[in-house]
Amino acid sequence: MTDGSKKKNSIPLIGALALKNQLVTKTELEAALVHCKGADEPDEALKEYFQSQELISNKNIQRLTLAAKAISIRQKEFKFGAIALAKGFINKSVLDLALEDQESDLKSGQKPRLIGDMMVEAGLLTERQRDYILKLQNRIKKAGPAAVAPLPQDLSCDPTTEEESGDASEDTVDDASLMPPESIVGGIQLQLAGDFMAAFLSKTKEFDEDITTSEIKEALFDRGIVSGLVADDMIEGFIQSTGFKTQSFRVAKGVRPIQGRDAKVEYFFNTDYLKAGGMDEDGNIDFKQRGEIPLVEKGTVLAEKTPRVEARWGQNIYGDEVSTDKGEDVPLKFGKGAVLSEDGLKILSAVRGYPKFSLAGVVFVNEEYTTSGDVDFETGHIEFDGNVNVKGCIKSGFKVTGCDVATVELDGGIVEADGDVKVAGGINEGTIYARGSVYAKFVHNSEIVCMGDIHIQKEIVDSTIETSGACVIANGKLISSRLTAKMGVTARHIGTEMASPSNIKVGYDAFTEKEVKKNRAKVARIKEEIAAKKGKKAEVRRENTELQKKITELAHVQDRSQLEQNETAEQLKKSSQATQSAELKARLTELEEQIETTEQDLDYCFEKSEALEQQLQSIDRELAELENQREMLVEERNNLTRWAKDNPGKALVAVEGAILAGNVIYGKHSELTVDKEIRHSRITEVQFKSDAKDGGRLVYRMNVGNF
């Protein structure tokens, strides 16, 4: 919404005063308003117009300016009093006395004191209450946290400002939300809505039947009520009516704002990509598994967006703008295998496949690549931008890259997956990197780094494991391994009498730390590429600029040559001397050769310039792609960091069977070396206060409890 759309609809104060004091006619004022429409400072523009058209003298302009300033102050002061009454800081008699004193100052030509200062001096209002109201009116400058202290809780008032609006009906006002009535003129009472969005008139027993519409409007104007006034004929109807003694007549109505609402996106498949399972505080496995990812057909709706609600500014009866919360938009992000609907509000599947939600918040649909047997010399490495299903074994030295990867066995092979890795059999001397979870029967002499949980049925032996989730060996053993699991470890047994001990670290997020480091390195490389591309672009642009100069010079040479050629041809026609004619013919030949050479040079320059323009366009496309990659990486890092913060680690090891001596368990702040066999145990890191002789410090230790 443009600034112009937010300007008040009322006549500038200078114009209203000029008309009221009969310094200009209504027609002259209307012409002035048309001339000054859209001015940033309407009052100043009107003053300049009145002076330039010699409608008002300089002396009267000065008087109008002083009067407008005084009225502006009074408007703000009336509003100050209204807020103080609404908040229950003062009663009406205190306000009336303060306004009378201020009016006396104005009539005597003295500099008027603010009624808030008067009340503070008299001990009827605290400084904090005064500053609170001034802040609501935007009459106090923000100077840091100490500029205006917030009201203490014991003031028993609603700290909302008059700029906030609820969902109340515009046509009805609860009596409880009305301020105390005030007598204004001719036996008429004025009552304001507590949010200053409406003003009501009612008649008293002293109502003057001869009062005029102008007198009522002037009384309202003097109190700063300038916006949303009803038409004059409606006020006249109020005067002539025999009613409105028990019921109120709404004489002014503000424009209620429409609060903006953020756009929302609803996904029709499980997007809980980053949710690791782990264990609860009692050591029970909290699987929270997502189940099988659904297979979707082409055209399936994967996500739908509810557009944001645009905010609309409001205006109260004082003409003050009531601000709104601007609704934020949420983009629909989609990648390979997905398309946007024609209305731009849905993400649809473009292929038959499996939907996926990436760390950067992008929706993909992955098709599946299936091998009939092993991944070996016959197939070579497999790299597929989708799911990979290996119906055999991934052999030693061969690599499979995909989204979700499934295989029967992993024997010395390497797997890199953006999602889950599922091995029906075992993992032997394998290497796995996965941004999802890992499932297998056993793990021997392998390395696994993953973001989700690790679920192993039988055993982990001589392996290195790092996960941001939990490591679960529900029915088996952990033997001679190095294991880091942010969300804890559960196993049947840890260690054997013949094996070397294991090092177990829980509550620590090694995966996220490494991912963030890798992400920053990628972003840094992309920034270097962007800088290099921009340098190349500047170089190409300079070359093209020089080429354009050369084209201009050649064009001038061509123009001059053609002009001289025409002139020489005319001279040859008129020449009667043989010698002169021969010289002119020779010159014509030279000019033709020169024109032809220049034409060839121009053609070359134009072709080269076109090639440079295409090169610039290509660089721009590459820059846009690099910038998009950078933004995606930054968002991915932010999401990963946010997820890590929202899912704090659990320093917990739960063993139903036995933990043998020698195994070492590390928490985030402490460690435990098992010195004797422990059975049916639940080991957690706890915080406690040390003895008084040790200073009563908060310290950590690994606590051994029952399973």
Image (spheres, helix red, strand yellow):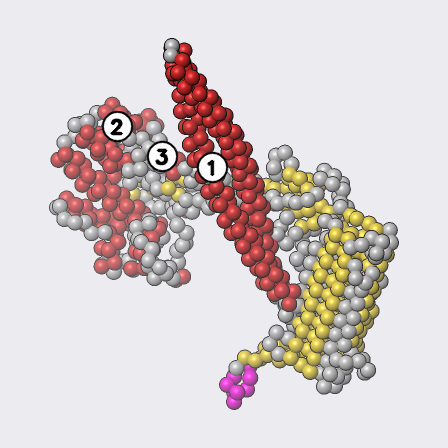
- What type is the residue that disc 1 sits on? Leu
Q: Residues within 10 Å of mark 1 (few under 14, many from 20)?
A: some
Could you say which is closer to the camera, residue 107 or residue 211? Answer: 107
Could you say which is closer to the camera, residue 466 or residue 310? Answer: 466
Query: Image height check: is 238 above or below 422?
Result: above
Could you say which is closer to the camera, residue 237 or residue 672? Answer: 672
Q: Which residue is mark 2?
A: 32
Residue 4 in the image, given as x and y percentages of width and height = 37, 35
**Which label sits on residue 547?**
1
Label 2: which secondary element: helix
Q: Quadrant of the C terminus?
A: bottom right
Mark 3 / mark 2, whichever is N-terminal? 2
Label 1: which secondary element: helix
**Which label sits on residue 228?**
3
Tell me the magenta residue range: 689-696
Q: Residues within 10 Å of mark 2 (few under 14, many from 20)?
A: some
Residue 119 in the image, given as x and y percentages of width and height = 25, 56
CA distance separating discs 2 and 1: 55 Å
Q: Nearer the viewer, mark 1 or mark 3?
A: 1
Residue sticking out furthest to the front: 579
Query: Image height check: is 142 above or below 304?
Result: below
Q: Is residue 693 magenta?
A: yes
Q: Nearer the viewer, mark 2 or mark 1?
A: 1
